[in-house]
Amino acid sequence: MKLIRAIIRPDKTETVVDVLETAGYVALTKMDIVGRGKQKGIQIGDIHYDELPKTLLMIAAEDTAVEEIISLISTSAKTGNFGDGKIFVTPLEQSYTIRTGTEGI
């Protein structure tokens, strides 16, 4: 199992979630966050915005689904501009459903 964390533009959240749901990946966690990447914020006129609003999606996935999920997120979240986001994939050793105690995704 893997944990996929995708940091994306807030305006792309609905598109990404819809694409994932259409592909059958309906279980995810969504959080509104702020942050900055290599661009170190954004300058608009005289105002510098150090941190920008972003959305964090967390998806637990079987190893065989990881590449497809990454592709779906990358394609549907991309604008081609700075600040499109980042995807992190880490090992996920175990998961349990609290209600049933069932192990696994």
Image (cartoon, rainbow, N blue to C red):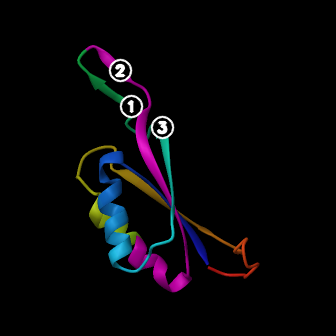
Classify residue 78 as left or right of residue 37. Answer: left
Residue 21 in which image quadrant: bottom left
The residue mark sitting in front, 3 or 1, is: 3
Q: Quick one: 64 or 14, which is closer to the camera?
A: 14
Give yes or no for residue 47 being in the magenta stretch: yes
Indicate which disc, 3 or 2, sits on the residue closer to the N terminus. 3
User: Alpha-carbon distance for marks 3 and 1?
Assistant: 11 Å
Q: Amino acid at mark 3?
A: Val
Quadrant for the N terminus, please. Answer: bottom right
Q: Secondary structure at mark 2?
A: strand
Residue at 44% of width from left, 76% of height from top?
25
Residue hosting label 1? 41
The mark lying in front, picked from 3 and 2, is: 3
Residue 71: percent from the left, percent from the top?
Answer: 35, 72
Upstream in sequence: badge 1 or badge 2:
1
The amino acid pointed to by label 1 is Gly
Q: Give the magenta part as a residue range.
A: 46-69
- Please indicate whether residue 85 sits to the left or right of residue 44 in the image: right
Q: Label 3 belongs to which residue?
A: 34
Q: Write down the residue under mark 2.
A: 48
- The location of residue 91, given as percent across then percent down, is 64, 71
